[in-house]
Amino acid sequence: MSTAERASLRHVFVDAIRGVLENNSRSDFPVHSLRGVSLICVQRWDEMVASVKKTVELIRQLMAIGILDSPSEGLEAIIACHYKSVGTQRKYAFSCKW
């Protein structure tokens, strides 16, 4: 990735986070620079990139097992396995394959 592309991508993240903060009345954070943004979301830029890469990889894995292709049957199975009917997360789900 070129330096220009990295800078452009960095501005996209900064602008998106700035918009979220402004919409949620968080004017106490300095979001005019990446350093200000890092105070509230990540400590380092490479951690943000690694997080995005991990998210993309997890989405690819979900697509590979077809959980997003079905009409939500797979998703319902995961929710049923990990959550009680009252909506609280189960502490242990040893029998779950997810």
Image (cartoon, rainbow, N blue to C red):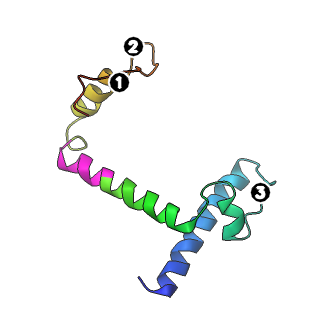
Query: Please, is residue 44 above or below residue 7 in the view?
Result: above
Q: Position of residue 51 (x, y in %)?
A: 45, 57
Residue 76 at x, y = what percent? 28, 27
Range drawn in magenta = 58-66
Q: Nearer the viewer, mark 1 or mark 2?
A: 1
Which quarter of the picture shows residue 36?
Answer: bottom right
Residue furthest to the top in view is 86
Q: Earlier in the sequence, mark 1 or mark 3?
A: 3
Badge 1 is on which residue?
Answer: 82
Marks 2 and 3 close (CB-CB < 8 Å)? no
**Mark 2 lies on residue:** 85
* Residue 12 shown in magenta: no
For label 1, the crowd category at 10 Å Cα-Cα, with few meaning under 14, some 14 to 19 and many 20 or more, is some
The residue at the point 43 percent across, 22 percent down is 89
Spatial CA span between label 2 and label 3:
39 Å
Q: Mark 2 vs mark 3: which is more N-terminal? A: 3
Most common SS among magenta residues = helix
Question: For the residue marked with disc 3, what is the amino acid?
Answer: Phe
- How far apart marks 1 and 3 lie (CA) works out to 36 Å
Q: Residue at label 3?
A: 29
Quadrant position of the N terminus in the picture: bottom left
Residue count near mark 3 (Cα–Cα under 10 Å), binned few <14, some 14–19, many ≥20: some
What element does badge 1 sit on?
Answer: helix
Label 2: state its secondary structure. Answer: loop
Q: Which mark identifies residue 32? A: none
- The quadrant the C terminus occupies is top left
Q: CA distance from mark 1 to mark 2?
A: 10 Å
> In the rendered view, would you say 9 is above or below 2?
above
> Which image quadrant is residue 19 in?
bottom right
